[in-house]
Amino acid sequence: MSKKNNQLSGPTIQPRPAMRPIHRVKGMKDIQPGNYDAWNFLLRSTFKLAEFHGFERIDTPVLESFALYERSSGRTSDIVTKEMYSFVDKSGERLALRPEATPGIVRAYIEHGWFNLPQPLKTLWYGPLFRRDKPQLGRYRQHHQLNFDIFGEAGPWAEIQLLFLIHELLQDWGIKAQIDINSLGCADCRPNYTNELVKYYKEKKHREQLCPDCRRRLLKNPLRLLDCKEPACIALAQDAPQIIDYLCGPCKEHLVKVLEFLDNLGIQYNLNSQLVRGLDYYDRTVFEVVMPSASAQRPLALGGGGRYDHLIESLGGRPTPACGFALGLERLLLNLEPHKVAASKERPDVFLAQLGEGPRLKSLRLFEELRQAGLAVHQSFTKESLKGQLAIANQLKVKYTLILGQKELLDGTILLRDMESGSQEVVDLKKIKPILLKRLTKTR
Ligand code: AMP
């Protein structure tokens, strides 16, 4: 092309380089269309049951001060040393994306003086947590938990209520999981046990088999040796001394009471002497919900918790006994039967189909009128074809579909289709609401 020509046609437009899509951050998950049915199934039943049991919904911020976790979860815990997303913000404050819920909940308990509310106080918390874990199936860098906590109850009744609630939820969800339980004793009896444990692991033949992480744990946090996931360490833990043999009188009595209640309620459990949980703040009872597995590897837990009678005090509050439990939503989702979720979906009463611009507008008004009359109405105003709309109505398993076309609009009528029999009748548009209400109350 000549220079002149080039000038006439203006500057050449360079083809845009193909834009590379940006992917989600490693270990994060999107909730895609269709996924929420299962989430809703879990969340709705939890919120309902928790309300029946007198748990109050609370929330805390995603961002907290780093020191909160350092002081509660423990300086040597995996969460603080390896997994926390922390950063210094522009004002120089060290902050963290919450890796677990309990410290934030306890901070709020102290900060807002929840001890002035009637005790025991029962709270339910739901939200995302962030841990820089090694991503794999069931282990993500953002996951969601449901946390149940009971404050101000020192007796075994707190554990019983939590375990009973978990048992009920698992039954509602159709998840056949196992409840593991143990006691970590208290500040009086635990040191004797830890000494014995250290002695056992320091024996040359045992020490040599430990993984590098456990050699470190032996010095800093020996209890954690019992829940290491390395096969050699799992084998060694089998023959380690058991804490149950070292519990003091009151701790033993507390555990026995919890177990007696469970027996009474017919809730099965597995007394697991290797269950220690990964955090520093637990006293006495600890528990976990696991899916029974045939392999030697410890299965991924669905949830876990325990008593933390000294955490509130150690974060600056007045001494208050407490007990809590967390369920991991993503792991529960992996264990849900799809038919349970499908069966839980509410069946709408009516589907409203329309054909053409005028009927669509009229349908919008009718939709609002029927909805306000208390009917569960669904629609798909963006779909043009009747076939497509009826397919949705079928999928939703509605009892009736209303069809409004140009002819009906002019006549002031509407077609009422019984989806089970396929029969169709022409109805006066003004009478459709009372007719539907009458028929549906009969069949409900
Ligand atoms: P924890 O706070 O570690 O006691 O965990 C409580 C529950 O949260 C676990 O039993 C899991 O169900 C779930 N959970 C913990 N960490 C993760 C993770 N990285 N990804 C998915 N779920 C998790």
Image (cartoon, rainbow, N blue to C red):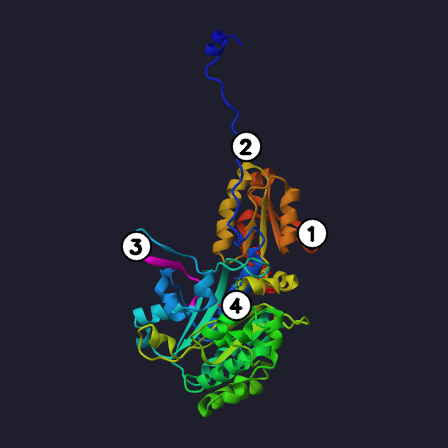
Q: CA distance from mark 3 to mark 2?
A: 40 Å
Q: Are marks 3 and 2 in contact (CB under 8 Å)?
A: no
Query: Of the residues under marks 2 and 4, which one precedes in the sequence?
Result: 2
Identify the residue position indicated by label 2 in the image. 18
Position of residue 371 measured from the top left corner of the image (x, y, whole percent): 50, 54
Q: Secondary structure at mark 2?
A: loop
Mark 2 crowd level (few <14, some 14–19, many ≥20, 10 Å Cα): few
Amino acid type of disc 1?
Ser
Which residue is depicted at the point 55% across and 84% down? 242
Check the image and report above or below for 218 versus 346.
Answer: below
Identify the residue position indicated by label 4 in the image. 213
Position of residue 31 measured from the top left corner of the image (x, y, whole percent): 54, 53
Which residue is depicted at the point 63% across and 40% down? 385
Q: Nearer the viewer, residue 252 or 150?
A: 252
Indicate which disc residue 423 carries.
1
Q: CA distance from mark 1 to mark 2?
A: 54 Å
Amino acid type of disc 2?
Ala
Amino acid type of disc 3?
Gly
User: Of the residues tagged 1 and 2, which is closer to the observer?
Assistant: 2
Query: Of the residues under marks 3 and 2, which one precedes in the sequence?
Result: 2
User: Of the residues tagged 4 and 1, which is closer to the observer?
Assistant: 4
